[in-house]
Amino acid sequence: MHSNVNDWLHEHGDYLYRFALARLKDTHQAEDAVQETMLAAIKHNSFGGDSSVRTWLTGILKHKIVDIQRKLIREQPISDLIGLDAGDDAMDDFFDKTGHWLDKPQSFDMPDHALEQSQFLSVLDDCMQKLPKKLKAIFMLRDVHEMENENICKELEITPTNAWVMLYRARMVLRKCLELNWVKG
C-alpha cells in the first residue's frame, strides 16, 4: 500500500494542487487541502477500484475544499461582515425606493464566447476577490461547485432564506463589478 501512496502523490499531486488552487485562490489553503486529502486517503484507504485513483482523490479533495471554505466563514472577522446587515444601503446602488431597477441590467451578449476569453476570466477573478469571504464562499459552492441549496445550508449552517439572500447579493455585486469592468455599454 505504501508504494501506492507514493505513486498517488507523484502521479496526481500536481493535478490536485491545481484543482484546489483554482477553487480556493490561496496557495497555502490549496496545499493544506491536498495534504488533508492525501492523509484521508492513507488513513481510510477506501479506494475500491470503482473509479480511477484521480477521480477518487478528487472526490476527497472536493470535501476538503468545502471544509476549508466553511472554516473560513466561521472564522470570518467582524470587519468582513460590515455591509451584510439587513439594513445595509449596498442595495441602494441597484434599486430605487419602490424596488425598481435604477439602471436595468445589461444583457451579456454571447456569454459562452466571453467566458473563453482570458481577459474576461481575469476581470471575473478580480471581481470575485472583492467579494466578502462569506459571499464568495456561497457563490463558489452554488454556482461553481453546483452544490444544492439544501447541502449548502447544512455545510455552512445557515437557513435557506439566508443562503438565497447571500447568493443574490453575491451575484448582484459580481454583476455590477462585471458591468463596470468588462461590459461596454
Image (cartoon, rainbow, N blue to C red):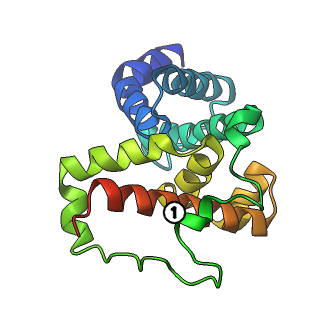
Q: Residue at x 62, y 82 (%)?
A: 99
- Does residue 95 appear to the left or right of 73 in the view shown? left
- Nearer to me, 18 or 138: 138
Q: Residue at x 54, y 44 (%)?
A: 59
- Residue denoted by label 1: 171
Decide: few, some or many residues near mark 1? Use Cα within 10 Å; few <14, some 14-19, many ≥20.
some
Query: How many discs mark residues in the rendered view?
Result: 1
Q: Quadrant of the N terminus?
A: top right
- Does residue 44 appear to the left or right of 29 in the view shown? right
Q: Residue at x 71, y 44 (%)?
A: 82
Q: Residue at x 68, y 50 (%)?
A: 83
- Nearer to me, 141 or 51: 141
- Nearer to me, 182 or 157: 182
Q: Secondary structure at mark 1?
A: helix
The kind of residue tagged 1 is Arg
Q: Position of residue 173 (x, y in %)?
A: 50, 58
Q: Position of residue 13 (x, y in %)?
A: 40, 24
Q: Position of residue 6 (x, y in %)?
A: 45, 15
- Does residue 54 appear to the left or right of 143 in the view shown? left
Instruction: Evaluate whether residue 66 shows in this view.
Output: yes
The image shows residue 70, relative to residue 27, as above or below, that is below
